[in-house]
Image (spheres, grey):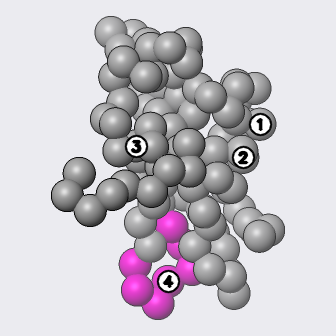
Amino acid sequence: MAVEAFKIEGMRDNKLLGRKELKIRIDHFGKGTPTRAEVREKVAKMLNASIDQVYVRKIETKYGMNVSWATVHVYDDPKRALEIEPEYIIKRHRGEEAKEGE
């Protein structure tokens, strides 16, 4: 899916956790909400980071709007991300489905 505009609206450098916390605006007129994988790839390219360092926490689209807001964490070290990110977020990025009751 081609995204028309992809803009970093806010960036916070969290030195204690070794990550950058991004708020991204995604304009996708006439198209559906972009997938987590698409957002990860785009952020990794923009920041010259490995895809293993990028974790999309949330993508939110208001009903009827063609604009989404994504909350993304970019870690300095991929091992640090595995220590900090919740297990369900890590599973989403590996493509694993959460089992009922987890």
For residue 14, side relative to residue 9 (left or right): left
Report the disc number at residue 67: none
Residue at (62%, 66%) from the top-left corner?
34
Can you identify the residue that label 3 sits on? Answer: 89
Residue at (50%, 83%) from the top-left corner?
65
Image position, residue 26 (x, y; %): 60, 62
Q: Which residues are magenta?
A: 62-68
For residue 36, side relative to residue 5 (left or right): left
For residue 61, side relative to residue 3 (left or right): left
Q: Is residue 72 at least partly visible in the picture? A: no
Along the viewing direction, whichever of 92 and 17 lies nearer the viewer: 92
Can you identify the residue that label 4 sits on? Answer: 65
Can you identify the residue that label 2 sits on? Answer: 42
Lower sequence index among marks 4 and 3: 4
Amino acid type, residue under disc 4 in the picture: Met
- Circle 4 sits in a helix, a strand or a loop, which is it? loop
Lower sequence index among marks 1 and 4: 1
